[in-house]
Image: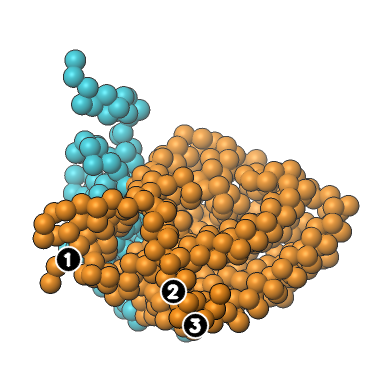
Chain colours: A cyan, B orange
Amino acid sequence: MNREEILNNIKDRFKDCIKNFVDKSPKRIYIDIEPKCLRDVVCYVFKDLQARFNTASGIHTRVGFEILYHFSFDNLGLIISLRVKLETDKARIDSITPIIKGAEWIEREMHELLGIDFVGHPNLKRLLLAEDWPEGVYPLRADYKEWDKNSIRDRGVKE
Amino acid sequence: MSRTIIPIGPYHPLQEEPEFFQLVVDGEKIVDAVANIGYNHRGIEKLSELKSFDQATFVVERICGICSNSHPLAYVQAVEDIIGADCVIPERALYIRTVTAEIERIHSHLLWLGLAGHFLGYNTVYMWAWKEREEILDILEELTGNRNNYAMNKIGGVRRDLNKDSFGGVIKRLNKLIEFMVMIKKAVLDDPVLHIRLKGVGILTQKDCIDYCALGPTSRASGIAKDVRKDEPYAAYDRISWNVITQNEGDVFAKVVVRILEIFESIDIIKQCLRKMPDGPIDAHIKDIPPGEGIGHIEAPRGECFHYVRSDGSNRPVRHKVRAPTFMNLPTYKQSLIGQTISDATIILAAIDPCYCCTERMTIIDANNKKKTFLSQEELIRLSQKKTEDIKNKMGIK
């Protein structure tokens, strides 16, 4: 399948899910999709189109969360990034780990660093942060302040 | 059936990454394994958001001491992707990037080869490979000025030019390395002990590679011919001729072979680059980074290294996501380790080149009577070496 066929297939199949389609350059494409369609689109791209899952980038902006799921089509040198947007107080999305085993760790990472809840993840434990890192402090959120670091550094020290 | 849990890790200064493993064993056989990482988490992604675009190149260079060219290269490509078609990198800079990247690949693969030899009880391989690696570091010093952390990559080009006078000496040294590699290749392929020790051990099937999205030599040893250098050529890889190395077996032996053959390809790439390198400027002098987002990915020695950068038009990235190859390769231990014996654990874990077979100490906990036994890291390696010794004795090889 060439580039045009892949794009047309995705466009046709998920007409109602695609909010925005950015053909940025011959090698990079960004597709905004509805969060509720995520699993269907990922399943189609990974299983049927046989793309390779690169990773996912979670971002916290002033308006909310964005998660980009990057897929590469190695024979074409093409990277398609699926973007979902979530509101800060509704940080929940379906986990894609049941479809892609390789997504387990990155979802665990986003869960602890950004505080996004992945529904249906088989093992949503901490990956990188220490066990005594306080609950509810998410270092990659936009509102995370430097002073938090000191309070964390001094945790457990009795006055 | 009694099950025993063996924790491995988390710290050992021998290698660059601390990792903690719990092996659940039934007798000698591994029935389950759990990995625990994060001992080395330094918040580089957050730190990078506090630096300017140019400074961040130096920050990501310090993610890893061995791939200290891969991360900056992937990062500058991500930033150049934000700028888009306006950013034309001078030809000479592309060749210089290729040369540095390939020398780094050779030194990384030689380092791995030496360690693998050590874990198997082939300490001669360990000494020889590291001796040759020293020559490679000398080449790096001669060309870039640094043995490590070369600081060659810059948004829009490279920081330093290469001196033409040194090319002759570099090629002479590379030719010497070819002689050594021919010897090592013959020694590995002809050694019956290595065949018994490594063939059929820690097999990773093609399906597992696709499921876990494994990368680099780990997946190429399972017959997946994916290599970013060929798939989406960056730097000067599309201007020279070279081959993607694959093996079909997926076991540890195939991974050794892939890495050894890749060294030959790298030497060839460097020689072609030095011969063909055009004269001209080395920097496109990029001033401003426009708002937008970009992706840069390159083939590091261990697999694809992936960077995502977002800019809001200021002089700092608002988000910088780094995905190192081991992040995808490490979870494959679930497939390759289970069903194998403890004495093979070190080499299977080492086969994906993540550097965590650094077993500082090992505790054996018997699930039934909660008895604890502490074994040192040396003893775990000794277990592995003893197995090789036993095979040699059985075959009558001294």
Which mark identifies residue B149? Answer: none
Instruction: Indicate which label's residue lies in the foreground, 2 or 1.
Output: 2
Residue B46 drawn above or below residue B292: above
10 Å neighbourhood of mark 3: few (<14), some, or many (≥20)? Answer: few
Chain containing mark 2: B
Q: Quadrant of the C terminus of chain A?
A: top left
10 Å neighbourhood of mark 1: few (<14), some, or many (≥20)? Answer: some
Nearest the viewer among B372 and B36 is B372
Which mark identifies residue B3? Answer: 1
Q: CA distance from mark 2 to mark 1?
A: 26 Å
Tell me, yes or no, whether dots 2 and 3 are on the same chain: yes
First along the sequence among labels 2 and 3 = 2
- Contact? badges 2 and 3 (CB < 8 Å): no
Q: Which residue is mark 3?
A: B395
Secondary structure at badge 1 equals: loop
Nearest the viewer among A43 and B312 is A43
Residue found at x 20% / y 56%:
B365
Secondary structure at badge 3 equals: helix
Percent position (x, y) of residue B163? Answer: 84, 49
Q: Which residue is mark 2?
A: B390
First along the sequence among labels 3 and 1 = 1
Percent position (x, y) of residue B319? Answer: 43, 45
Chain containing mark 1: B
Tell me, yes or no, whether dots 2 and 1 are on the same chain: yes
10 Å neighbourhood of mark 2: few (<14), some, or many (≥20)? Answer: few
Dot 2 amino acid type = Asp
Q: CA distance from mark 2 to mark 3?
A: 9 Å
Residue found at x 36% / y 51%:
B376
**Along the horizontal axis of the image, is A58 left or right of B248?**
left
Residue B276 drawn above or below residue B196: above
